[in-house]
Image (cartoon, rainbow, N blue to C red):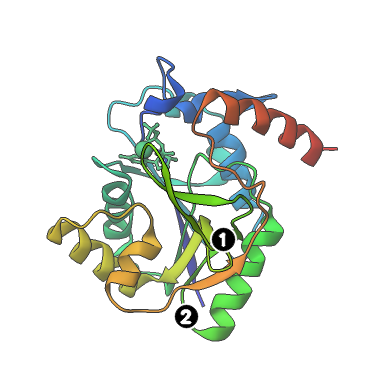
Amino acid sequence: ISIAAVVPAAGVGARMGLNHPKQYLKINDKTILEHTLEKLAGVKQIDHTFVAISKDDAYFPELDIEHLGLSRVDGGKERADSVLNALKAMSANPPKWVLVHDAARPLVEPKDIEKLIAHCLSAGEGGILASKVKDTIKRGGQYSEETVPRDQLWQALTPQLFIFEELLHALDTALKSGAIITDEASAIELQGKPVRLVEGRSDNIKITTPEDHALACFLMSQQQK
Ligand code: CTP
Ligand code: MG
């Protein structure tokens, strides 16, 4: 059974507010993107990794990652376009499964990735890492209109693992229809296909703002102890 990975890393990081994409911010000794790629490289079941990078990205060639043997593909307008470009690049030699993981989530534990792979492969169904919502959730605008019961609420994380052909079709269809999809699972849901929720660590955060970066630096130093 073959598993290929896709790392979308073609965003600009607008919410981080820097003059360079956030995946090139450092955590301790290395960039966020290098940490993420090394985490994936530690998962033996992954046969090959494709990284989606902006065409005009001058930072990527400077990274010290030759030893990881990655394939670079062009990013697209939105995250889903970047992922779809990578899937199309794989089509010549398609894997059975594809695992998509945000460049901006360097804190993922290889153990959690292995847990997702084990659950999905044994069930023969796609799935995602997710964590249970911990906060009290309100729905409203200026005023709270309702407290939403959280027993059925999950926060979607990555990686997200799906059968290659099913994800290719789902993303292609969703993008052509103009649907708003912020992760792979939302495209699969539109196809009426199951998405297993596999509980993952809630410290697998997506680094989006400067506060997230500060927290990630702390969490990474704890992990490396
Ligand atoms: N991404 C991508 N291609 C895009 C947009 C995003 O590959 N056109 C990637 C980002 O590089 C990131 C992941 O998708 O690893 C999750 O996206 P997000 O956290 O939103 O990153 P950015 O889009 O870069 O940040 P922002 O939305 O603040 O601009
Ligand atoms: Mg974005």
Could you tell me which residue is drawn at 48 percent across and 66 percent down? 161
Using the image, tell me which numbered label, if any, was put on residue 130.
Answer: 1
- From the top left corner, tell me how far across and down residue 157 is, in percent: 53, 54
Could you tell me which residue is drawn at 35 percent across and 26 percent down? 57
Badge 1 density bin: few <14, some 14–19, many ≥20, Cα 10 Å: many
Q: Quadrant of residue 150?
A: bottom right
In this view, 225 is above or below 146: above
Q: Nearer the viewer, residue 110 or 90?
A: 110
Q: Say which of marks 2 and 1 sits in front.
A: 1
Numbered circles on residues, count: 2
Could you tell me which residue is drawn at 68 percent across and 52 percent down? 109
Residue 221 located left or right of residue 89: right
In this view, 19 is above or below 193: above
Q: Nearer the viewer, residue 144 or 40?
A: 144
Mark found first going from the N terminus, 2 or 1: 2
Query: Would residue 81 be visible to someone looking at this image?
Result: yes
User: Residue furthest toward the bottom?
Assistant: 123
Dot 2 amino acid type: Glu
- From the top left corner, tell me how far across and down residue 133 is, in percent: 59, 56
User: Residue furthest toward the left?
Assistant: 177
Mark 2 residue's CB less than 8 Å from ligand 1: no
The quadrant of the picture showing ligand 1 is top left
Residue at numbered disc 2 = 125
- From the top left corner, tell me how far across and down residue 79 is, in percent: 33, 46
Dot 1 amino acid type: Ala
Which secondary structure, mark 2? loop
Mark 1 residue's CB less than 8 Å from ligand 1: no
State which quarter of the image contains the C terminus.
top right
Which secondary structure, mark 1? strand
Using the image, tell me which numbered label, if any, was put on residue 119.
Answer: none
- From the top left corner, tell me how far across and down residue 192 is, in percent: 31, 79
